């Protein structure tokens, strides 16, 4: 969800105003995602690296997160949404944990959609933590090092508890992942939108999904057409694509 700061700067407003408008976009997109029947929506709300922003901006973001969790609590519960959080939650201020933790708990039996908030999240940090977990298990004799494979590592990544992401959308015009879902992103489809996050609407999401639906996902294999013609597999000039 990128572009809040620029949205505000364009209007001659402080960056915090952009984050406030961004939280209205979160409400819109969560609501429509639930209506569309999306299984899981992971929102990159705050990265590990975002702690380095000016303290006033960090405080404003934490305040908005607190406000969001309070104001959306009923809607989340009434709509069967399971709220989870991924990232280093120990860094979040207590006043955020005080609303976040009870909502995670109260919503854990819900099954209509999982809303995962990435808070103090970093894809590299997540992988490093999983590696640490695996190493501890090996050191304590609970795990055979030869059993460490892609699945074993993926099983330790909280971001993949909802499965691999199918589509990763980045708004705000930049074309990079910025440490989001790195392991799960291996075969995710990527969509980049120039729309600044506060302006992102239901229609923008529909367009991204429609574009996703037209793509052919090959996961390093050959396309469906090629499979029906075995010779095409041998002669395909595109290796590893
Ligand atoms: C993204 O908007 C919101 C968060 C990181 C929480 P930015 O604040 O990065 O907005 P720009 O990139 O400066 O426009
Ligand atoms: Mg940005």
Image (cartoon, rainbow, N blue to C red):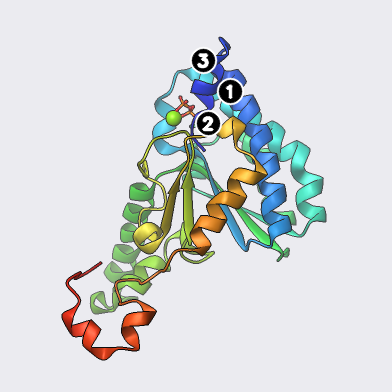
Between the residue at mark 3 and the residue at mark 1, the CA separation in whole angstroms equals 8 Å
**Residue at 53% across / 27% down in the picture?**
4
**Comes first in the chain, label 3 or label 1:** 3
**Comes first in the chain, label 1 or label 2:** 1
Is there any visible trace of residue 108 in the rendered image?
A: no
Which callout, 1 or 2, points to the residue nearer the camera?
A: 2
**Residue at 47% across / 33% down in the picture?**
172
The picture quadrant where one finds residue 35 is: bottom right
Q: Can you give x and y, in whole percent of width and height, for residue 188 in the image?
A: 41, 60
Task: Say which residue label 1 marks.
Answer: 18
Q: Residue furthest top?
A: 12
Which type of secondary structure does the marked residue at label 1 adopt? Answer: helix
Task: Say which residue label 2 marks.
Answer: 196
Q: Is residue 225 left or right of residue 111?
A: left
Residue sitting nearer the eye, 216 or 84: 216
Q: Is residue 169 left or right of residue 229?
A: right
| Residue behind label 2 places its C-beta within 8 angstroms of ligand 1 | yes
Task: Say which residue label 3 marks.
Answer: 9
Between the residue at mark 3 and the residue at mark 2, the CA separation in whole angstroms equals 12 Å
């Amino acid at each position: 969800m990128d572009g809040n700061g620029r949205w505000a700067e364009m209007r001659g407003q402080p960056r915090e105003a952009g984050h406030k408008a961004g939280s209205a976009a979160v409400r819109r997109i969560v609501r429509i995602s639930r209506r569309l029947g999306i299984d899981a929506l992971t929102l990159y709300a705050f990265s590990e690296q975002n702690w380095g922003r000016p303290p006033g901006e960090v405080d404003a973001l934490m305040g908005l997160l607190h406000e969001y969790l309070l104001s959306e609590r009923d809607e989340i519960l009434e709509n069967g949404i399971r709220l989870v959080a991924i990232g280093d939650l120990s860094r979040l201020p207590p006043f955020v944990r005080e609303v976040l933790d009870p909502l995670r708990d109260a919503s854990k039996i819900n099954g209509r959609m999982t809303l995962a908030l990435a808070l103090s999240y970093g894809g590299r940090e997540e992988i490093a933590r999983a590696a640490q977990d695996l190493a501890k298990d090996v050191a304590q004799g609970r795990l055979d090092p030869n059993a460490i494979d892609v699945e074993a590592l993926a099983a330790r990544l909280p971001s993949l508890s909802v499965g691999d992401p199918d589509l990763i959308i980045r708004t705000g015009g930049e074309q990079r992942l910025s440490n989001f879902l790195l392991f799960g992103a291996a075969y995710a489809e990527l969509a980049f939108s120039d729309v600044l996050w506060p302006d992102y609407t239901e229609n923008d999401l529909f367009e991204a999904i429609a574009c996703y639906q037209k793509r052919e996902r090959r996961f390093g294999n050959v396309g469906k057409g090629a499979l029906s013609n075995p010779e095409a597999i041998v002669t395909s000039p595109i290796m590893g694509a």
